[in-house]
Amino acid sequence: MKETYNIKFNKKELAGSFGDIGTDLPLIVGMISAVNLHSGSVFIMFGIMQIFSGLIYGLPMPLQPLKAMAVLVISEKISPNILFGGGLSIALIMILLTVTGSLHWLGKLIPLCVVRGIQCGLGLSLASLALKNYITADGIQGYILALVALGIMVIIPKNSLIPAGLLVIGMGIIYSFFFDLQIVEIIDNIGFSLPQPHQPTISDIATGFVILALPQLPLSLSNSVIATHQTVKDLFPNSEVSLKKIGFTYTIANMIMPFFSGIPVCHGCGGLAGHYSLGGRTGGSVIIYGLMYLIIGLFFSAVFTQVVAVFPLPILGIVLLFEALTLLLFMADQSASQQNLMIAFLVAVIAFSVPQGYLVGLVIGTLIYYGKKSLNEEAVIKKY
């Protein structure tokens, strides 16, 4: 029987609203810092889409930055125009997969071991970025900051009212105020902001499709759609959230975002689990979460741009490192099968090290899985 999840606003929903900020905020800050995105547009649109998702689902179903795109933008300094074009192109792909029924078919076709390999490959990319580019950025002072941030992330329990990721980000902001920011300048820059209109070109959409959408697509299919659908069934067994609905909301969000200089977004099983683990049981937690970003974008975007410009990279690196660890640990459920574990590791290595590795790893891993399955079935038939 279908259960209706009424939207609520209480202390549990408030606590749940912090469930995904430790993952989202570092990626958002990283992209704003790396390619000089308009912070007001990014925060306003990100907040609006959270509210949209909370209202549509009535569940703690947040939206997150597209992780593969975020990693590529941060590490390769890909221009905002191409980022917006990539967001629109993956929306077009997703709507095609959704309306043709291909999304449901792919959900059944792609083996879980390949999904885990893709998640692991992304985790390796994040860990490499954190260790090579962020934690080492400020010398001895940076290592001390990173060590303190690491201690907070390890000591603070996951079910804490204030998540460790938020405390670490807060520490970075406070550090910035003490050493690099002028209070008077900050106060002078408080003001009203609106999203900047943007018109993606055919060239940006085509380029974004090749260098951003294709690497992102396997992760979106596996984690944003398939794994999220499974997590909804696990946490809310009486709800009726279909793959098609997830595909449609994914599409709608990314059809809108590029035209207002917003970053591409997706649903995610980690975000859903994060809100749930801290107490979120309805869309109220996601709406509260969205309102926070909306207020920052509308009134404090110029201030936030200043903060981002001097935010200590070693602290960001530690949070990214824990994000990587979360993705790497998903591999644990493949340990029961040596064959599946090896396929997952192979996909991870390909995703991490080969150009267009997420797509290549998805194809190769799936072919190996079904090839092995076919050989095993033939062996059983010959035996009897």
Image (cartoon, rainbow, N blue to C red):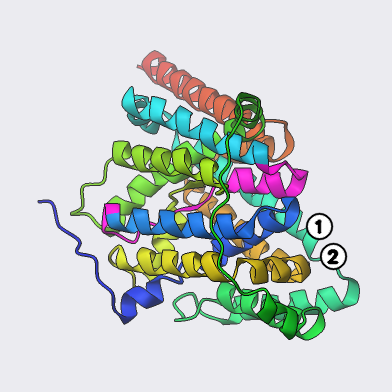
Relative to residue 279, is residue 332 depicted above or below? above
The segment highlighted magenta reads 56-80
Badge 1: residue crowd in 10 Å (few <14, some 14–19, many ≥20)? some
| Picture coordinates of residue 296, whole percent (x, y) | 54, 69
Q: Which quarter of the rendered picture does the C terminus lie within?
A: top left
Which element carries disc 1, helix, strand or loop?
Answer: helix
| Picture coordinates of residue 323, whole percent (x, y) | 60, 60
Relative to residue 350, is residue 16 depicted above or below? below
| Picture coordinates of residue 155, whole percent (x, y) | 59, 82
Q: Is residue 113 visible?
A: no
Residue farthest toward the left in the current orientation of the protein: 1
Residue 57 falls within the magenta-colored stretch: yes
In three-dimensional space, the C-alpha distance between marks 2 and 1, rounded to whole angstroms, equals 6 Å
Which quadrant of the structure image shows residue 28? bottom right
Q: How many marks?
A: 2
Which element carries disc 2, helix, strand or loop?
Answer: loop
Q: Are marks 2 and 1 in contact (CB under 8 Å)?
A: yes
Looking at the picture, which amino acid does disc 1 mark? Asn
The residue lying at 63 percent from left, 32 percent from top is 208
Q: Nearer the viewer, residue 15 or 372?
A: 15
Look at mark 2 in the image and give the residue it sits on: 136
Look at mark 1 in the image and give the residue it sits on: 133
